[in-house]
């Protein structure tokens, strides 16, 4: 006499074995997927506010504040300005009276893609200030701006 529960037991064991096999294969597949390099998040451009922070931290701005005054700035958008890739600023001494001398501290541009700051008058990249470099590093990390992005956009000029 054959036990009628035996085929049910075999089916349960078969299902259990199949479940374990699928679970094992799924785990192996997941490990393979995890070992593949994942694309890095897309780089984002800096905002106007972040560019203004970089302007506020310029060595010229720090010197003005150390002399007991403060700076201000206006965003420049005229035709010679490369506004697609840069925020361009006229930076002034807020507290100097016009009749005493020029209020202009300088004209500076912040690259929207890299956070680089250019002195428009000397046409040079401002790169020697440690505090500015530290903030640029933080902004670049936050915006997923890696060395490749910096290399791609560093040669852009703020003036057309």
Image (cartoon, rainbow, N blue to C red):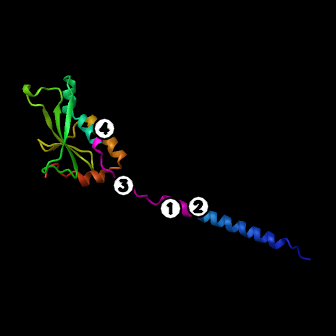
Q: Secondary structure at mark 3?
A: loop
Sequence-wise first label, 4 or 1: 1
Q: Secondary structure at mark 2?
A: helix
User: Residue 109 location in percent, x, y?
Assistant: 19, 44
- Residue beneath disc 3: 42
Q: Which callout, 4 or 2, points to the residue nearer the camera?
A: 4
Q: Residue at x 26, y 37 (%)?
A: 132
Near-viewer residue (117 or 21): 117
Q: Estimate the spatial distance between the alpha carbons at disc 3 and disc 2, rounded to whole Å.
A: 29 Å
Q: Residue at x 65, y 66 (%)?
A: 21
- Residue beneath disc 2: 27
Q: Estimate the spatial distance between the alpha carbons at disc 4 and disc 2, rounded to whole Å.
A: 42 Å
- Residue beneath disc 1: 33
Q: Are marks 3 and 2 in contact (CB under 8 Å)?
A: no
Tally of numbered tags: 4
Q: Residue at x 31, y 38 (%)?
A: 135
Few, some or many C-alpha atoms within 10 Å of disc 2 (few <14, some 14-19, many ≥20)? few
Sequence-wise first label, 4 or 2: 2
The residues colored magenta run 26-49
Near-viewer residue (123 or 101): 101
Q: Estimate the spatial distance between the alpha carbons at disc 3 and disc 1, rounded to whole Å.
A: 20 Å
Q: Estimate the spatial distance between the alpha carbons at disc 4 and disc 3, rounded to whole Å.
A: 22 Å
> Is residue 91 in the magenta section?
no
- Residue beneath disc 4: 134
């Amino acid at each position: 006499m054959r036990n009628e529960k035996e085929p049910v037991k075999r089916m349960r064991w078969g299902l259990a074995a199949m479940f374990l096999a699928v679970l094992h294969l799924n785990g192996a597949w997941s490990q393979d997927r995890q070992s593949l390099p994942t694309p890095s998040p897309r780089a984002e451009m800096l905002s106007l506010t972040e560019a203004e922070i970089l302007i506020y931290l310029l060595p010229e701005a720090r010197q003005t504040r150390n002399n007991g005054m403060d700076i201000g700035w206006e965003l420049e958008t005229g035709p010679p300005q490369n506004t697609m890739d840069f925020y361009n600023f006229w930076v002034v001494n807020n507290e100097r009276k016009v009749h005493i001398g020029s209020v202009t501290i300088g004209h500076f541009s912040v690259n929207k893609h890299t956070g680089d700051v250019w002195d428009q008058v000397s046409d040079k990249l401002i790169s020697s200030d440690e505090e500015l470099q530290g903030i640029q590093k933080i902004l670049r990390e936050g915006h997923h701006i890696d060395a490749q992005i910096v290399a791609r956009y560093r040669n852009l000029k703020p003036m057309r």
